[in-house]
Image: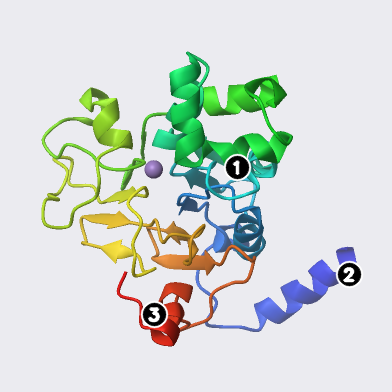
Amino acid sequence: MGRSFARRSTSLARLSLLPDQPLMAAHSPRIIAIADVHGCLNALDALLEAIAPASDDTLVFLGDMIDHGRDSRDTIERIIGLESQCAVVRITGNHEEMMLWARDDQKALAYWENHGGAPTLSSYRFPGRLQDIPEEHWRLVERCVPYYETEGFLFTHANYAPDLPMAEQAGSQLRWTLFDPQEMRPHMSGKPVLVGHTEQSSGEVLDLGFAMCLDTACWRYGWLTAIEPSTGEMWQASKWGVLREQGEESHRERLTMLFGANE
Ligand SMILES: [Mn+2]
């Protein structure tokens, strides 16, 4: 170790253009939003490998970590594991909310199962029951935050009321309201908002400048998207765990070309 450090110092000393700052500053902590994983573990793993989170980075899960996709149990396990590697913020999505409601009564359970919860239960055991979900997983789902706010950005699952401070936002607005580009207005804080929830049928991020929807429909035909808003750096992967290449089209575009489907 000592030898390689000495060699590095020697070569740096010869560079007259070296900026006047300590080497430590080469890495600054990142805040990265990860959109609706929906149990797509392979996509999440591909993104995590590409992002390589450092211990002072923050990963902000925008909600809907579970449901629809087939690996919800292992996705929750992965996120629990991540919490010992870097800072993790988990925002409640409408799917986490439905999972929690499912404990109330049979009707709420049936509602959740019919809206993407069935594969989540099956990821624990087939045919799965609520009792198959371990306490640690319930705790992760229970202990999510309604939104996340930093100095420069806001993060919610679905939407926001533009004229209300974040602390006064209704849960239904934050978790259920669709992102309609015609209706959206900047938040009163002036901070750009990153959301998921509304699947972009194009498979592309919808960026209005003041607000951005990152749900690029990974579990259907698109990509799982992660963005570092302060730099604009973006990572995307398919549910098969393959990173998106520059200019690569979504599977929906390809299917449309092959079969000429309109919807
Ligand atoms: Mn959602």
Quarter of the image for the N terminus: give it.
Answer: bottom right
Q: Can residue 101 be seen in this view?
A: no
Q: Name the residue under label 1.
A: 119
Residue closest to the eye, 199 or 173: 199
x then y, percent, for residue 190:
17, 46
- Could you give the CA–CA distance between mark 2 and mark 1, rounded to whole angstroms? 53 Å
Quarter of the image for the C terminus: give it.
Answer: bottom left
Label 1: few (<14), some (14–19) or many (≥20) C-alpha neighbours in 10 Å: many
User: Is residue 58 depicted above or below 240 in this figure?
Assistant: above
Question: Nearer the observer, disc 3 or disc 2?
Answer: 3
Tell me which amino acid carries mark 2: Arg
User: Is residue 220 depicted above or below 9 in this figure?
Assistant: above
**In the rendered view, does 231 fall on the left or right side of 177?**
right
Tell me which amino acid carries mark 3: Thr
Q: Mark 2 points at which residue?
A: 3
User: Is residue 56 depicted above or below 44 in this figure?
Assistant: above
Tell me which amino acid carries mark 1: Pro
Residue closest to the eye, 2 or 108: 108
Mark sitting earlier along the chain (3/2): 2
Question: Nearer the observer, disc 2 or disc 1?
Answer: 1
The quarter holding residue 239 reads bottom right
x then y, percent, for residue 108:
44, 22
Q: What element carries label 2?
A: helix
x then y, percent, for residue 56:
59, 46
Label 3: few (<14), some (14–19) or many (≥20) C-alpha neighbours in 10 Å: few
Mark sitting earlier along the chain (3/1): 1
Residue at 73% x, 72% y: name it. Answer: 9
* Residue 256's disc number: 3
Residue closest to the eye, 38 or 189: 38
x then y, percent, for residue 104:
48, 13
Q: Do the residues labelled 3 and 1 touch (CB within 8 Å)?
A: no
The quarter holding residue 240 reads bottom right
